[in-house]
């Protein structure tokens, strides 16, 4: 098992088809991002797409140093455009489901003016989101004409909705707030989400929704926690830990400091769940403690 494979395969998260690509051949993938070590593994993020009819399925996956698939970061369907002429906005269909209510926000979405998509984080049944997005894009354009350079942060009122707006190139992120309590956290989350350097990469809805969940639990959440959640792809990887029999003793040692060690470390070290899976499965309210615990395990060298 020591030879490096030339081809990596994984299952498309949209249509379940097997997709192959060659990590040594940049024409077979769209982007590649290497990461620092994570629990002894050297991980890389690849963005790979394939065409099905008039749809492009885009998968972002995590691969280890043996070119083995370790986890999905996200997947979405892109409608392939014909002519550039009159572009209609379209809603990105991507799991998980959009939040239908939030204690601090009436609606939250991100859009791209050039690529014409809208990605919803929190939806409001009273608002036609695509219409709101279209009007918002016009307002941003208006502001672009007025200002020498567009401020990073803007406020607009559209149809009685007070919108806080952040822009970056063709990207616009926006939220209607119920009050000021979570403004700082939303600003951190959305600014980081539209900072994405890959031109054609739609931000990950899993992370947007998780971030909004974390803010629902703690509106004053430490910004470094949100930045790590959105920025650290290693959190999507399932771990390949070589010393399974040692897990109980590691858990035992960590449990003295963090009383929920078993719920996190057992599924993580036995390769059953990624950190993101665990956050999605009910640990999001303890995100800060989860990160503290993982750092404690890495720093103490408990796995070595
Ligand atoms: Zn597919």
Image (cartoon, helix red, strand yellow):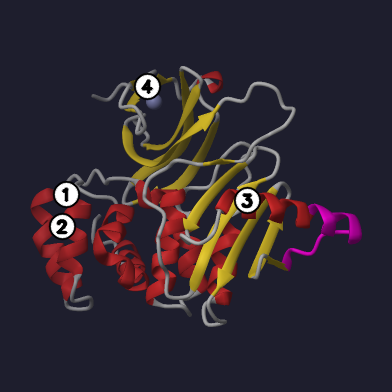
Q: Residues within 10 Å of mark 3 (few under 14, many from 20)?
A: few
Measured in 3D between alpha carbons, the distance from the residue under mark 4 to the one under mark 3, in whole angstroms, is 36 Å
Q: Quick one: 115 or 22, which is closer to the camera? A: 115
Indicate which disc residue 19 carries. 4
Q: Residues within 10 Å of mark 2 (few under 14, many from 20)?
A: some
Q: Which residue sits at x=52%, y=34%?
A: 32
Q: Earlier in the sequence, mark 1 or mark 4?
A: 4
Q: Quadrant of the C terminus?
A: bottom left
Q: Position of residue 274 (x, y in %)?
A: 28, 50
Q: Are marks 2 and 1 in contact (CB under 8 Å)?
A: yes
Q: Residues within 10 Å of mark 1 (few under 14, many from 20)?
A: some
Viewer-proximal residue, 168 or 154? Answer: 154
Screen quadrant of the N terminus: top left
Q: Secondary structure at mark 4?
A: strand
Q: Position of residue 76 (x, y in %)?
A: 45, 37
Asked if labels 3 and 4 touch by Cβ distance under 8 angstroms, the answer is no
Q: Which residues are magenta?
A: 141-155
With 29 as the anchor, is 88 left or right in this view? right
Q: Nearer the viewer, mark 2 or mark 4?
A: 4
Task: Tell whether circle 4 marks a residue whose Cβ is less than 8 angstroms from ligand 1.
Answer: yes
Mark in the foreground, 1 or 4: 4
197, 115: nearer the viewer: 115
Residue drawn at (31%, 21%), measured in percent from left and top?
A: 3
**Which comes before the other along the chain, label 2 or label 4?**
4
Dot 4 or dot 3: first in sequence order is 4
Which residue does the numbered mark 2 point to in the structure image? 266
Residue 219 image offset from top left, x and y in percent: 46, 78
Q: Residue at x 30, y 27 (%)?
A: 16
Q: Which residue is mark 3?
A: 131
Mark 1, secondary structure of its residue:
loop
């Amino acid at each position: 098992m020591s030879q490096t494979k030339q081809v990596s395969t994984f299952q498309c998260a949209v249509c379940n088809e097997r997709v192959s690509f060659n990590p040594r051949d940049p024409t077979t993938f769209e982007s590649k991002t290497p990461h620092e070590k994570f629990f002894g593994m050297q991980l890389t993020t690849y963005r790979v797409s394939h065409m099905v009819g008039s749809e492009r399925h885009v998968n972002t996956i995590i691969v280890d140093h043996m070119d083995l698939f370790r986890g999905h970061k996200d997947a979405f369907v892109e409608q392939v455009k014909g002519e550039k002429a009159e572009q209609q906005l379209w809603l990105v269909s991507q799991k998980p489901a959009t939040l239908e209510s939030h204690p601090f926000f009436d609606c939250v979405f991100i859009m791209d003016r050039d690529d014409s998509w809208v990605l919803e984080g929190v939806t409001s049944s009273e608002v036609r989101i695509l219409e709101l997005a279209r009007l918002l894009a016009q307002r941003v354009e208006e502001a672009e004409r007025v200002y020498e350079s567009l401020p990073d942060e803007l406020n607009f009122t559209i149809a009685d909705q007070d919108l806080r707006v952040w822009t970056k190139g063709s990207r616009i992120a926006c939220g209607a707030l119920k009050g000021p309590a979570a403004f700082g956290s939303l600003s951190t989350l959305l600014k980081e989400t539209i900072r994405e350097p890959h031109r054609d990469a739609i931000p990950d809805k899993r992370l947007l929704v998780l971030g909004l969940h974390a803010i629902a639990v703690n509106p004053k959440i430490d910004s470094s926690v949100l930045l790590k959640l959105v920025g650290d792809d290693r959190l999507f990887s399932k771990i390949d830990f070589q010393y399974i029999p040692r897990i109980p003793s590691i858990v035992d040692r960590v449990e003295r400091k963090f009383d929920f060690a078993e719920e996190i470390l057992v599924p993580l070290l036995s390769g059953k769940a990624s950190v993101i899976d665990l956050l999605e499965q009910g640990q999001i309210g303890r995100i800060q403690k989860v990160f503290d615990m993982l750092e404690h395990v890495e720093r103490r060298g408990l796995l070595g």
